[in-house]
Image (cartoon, rainbow, N blue to C red):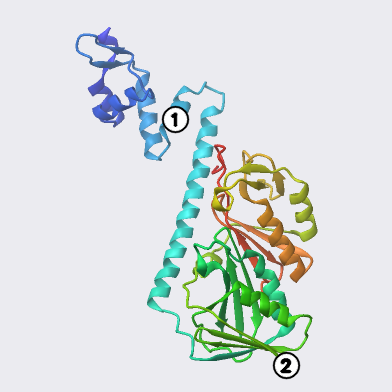
Amino acid sequence: MESELHSIGELARASGLGVGTLRYYDGAEVLTPAWVDPQTGYRWYRPDQLADARLLARLRRVGLPLAAVRDVLAAAPGSGDAQRVLDTHLRRLEDGLADARRELSLIRAMIDQREHPMTTTPAELRLVLPAAELAAALDAVRFAVGSDPELPSLAGVLFEPDGPLLRLVATDRYRMALAEVPVTGGPEEPVAGTVVPTPLVDALRALLGPSDGEAVLTLAGESVRAEVGGHRIEGVAPALEYPDHRTLTRLEPRHRIALPAADLRSAVETGATRTVPSGPDGTDCEVTLLALTPDGRLTVTADPAPEGLTVAVNRGFLLDAVDALAAARPGQLLLELDTPISPLAIRSADPADPFSLLMPVRLPAPGLAG
């Protein structure tokens, strides 16, 4: 019998796999020998297993998981099963490359920030803003303010002066909302922002009311003052470190889909959902799956699409974001998608309008990353 078989050493030399590796694949039931000598334990392989060994070497070279390698080697000829395994792996590699590029973009932004740190806020900064636009901006971000007592830096809105603009940012780690307001008196260069606590934000919004006049906002150290129509409020804004939103908002998505806000809301309200333990504090939440088909259509689905891109997000957060953006400017919305594990961006057609980012939810079902 041995004369008809290849020894493990011969198979190793012919396939490029080491003897130890072949023993490992035997134990993993990926490539088992045709015969094992009961006296010596020596492994012997059929001549046709040389082709499997060479294929196995190449499959592992491209990082195919062992379970998938086993599926390829066991696939019936002509069934297409092996090709489907390879297609899924290729999509996984492409998504991994996109994620690597995203991480490198974040790293570059962090290095830029290190090398060119933002200047500190002047002792007193007096900003004059259109009251109505400031009110609209607060409405556009208020829903995303955090409420976790363990994260006091998120329990407010970041007021970030940037030249002719005042940028407002709110996040609770699961979502992020941004809006900008034109300003007079802003600094020539970006300065460190001020985290205005939620009670003071709400008091400011109430002070603005339906006014069409001007609002004067003064940032002085840890003090915040606002004057509108002869009325004034003042409060304390403790010095807190806020997450750097720029590392997320500078990313370039691979897919942009435009659709009416009303259509998106209707589809989310009536579409299928899944309940997963991914809400704040680990609670269950309803998740909406947005599937982008290969032909560019966006649908709400019950299960991850076998082809194309599927992004899962908290249903309530998605509806909040759509409502906030539609209130700021009714009409078309622009959805920006990259990978299943990248934030979903929702914005108005006008790039100057507010926009929101929703963190994706990881589903327990297999195959989501494909």
193 lies above or below 173 = below
Q: Position of residue 264 (x, y in %)?
A: 75, 55
186 lies above or below 48 = below
Residue denoted by label 2: 230
271 lies above or below 55 = below
Q: Are marks 2 and 1 in contact (CB under 8 Å)?
A: no
Query: For this rendering, which residue is in front, 271 or 200?
Result: 200
144 lies above or below 31 = below
Which mark is in front, 2 or 1?
2
Identify which residue is drawn at 74% across, 62% down. Answer: 323
Report the amino acid beneath label 1.
Ala
Res 276 quadrant in image: top right
Identify which residue is drawn at 72% across, 78% down. Answer: 206
Crowd around label 2: few <14 · some 14–19 · many ≥20 (10 Å): few
Image check: 192 left or right of 5? right
The C terminus appears in which quarter of the rendering?
top right
Report helix, strand or loop for mark 2. loop
Q: Position of residue 326 (x, y in %)?
A: 76, 65
Residue denoted by label 1: 67
Report the amino acid beneath label 2.
Gly
Query: For this rendering, which residue is in front, 71 or 79?
Result: 71
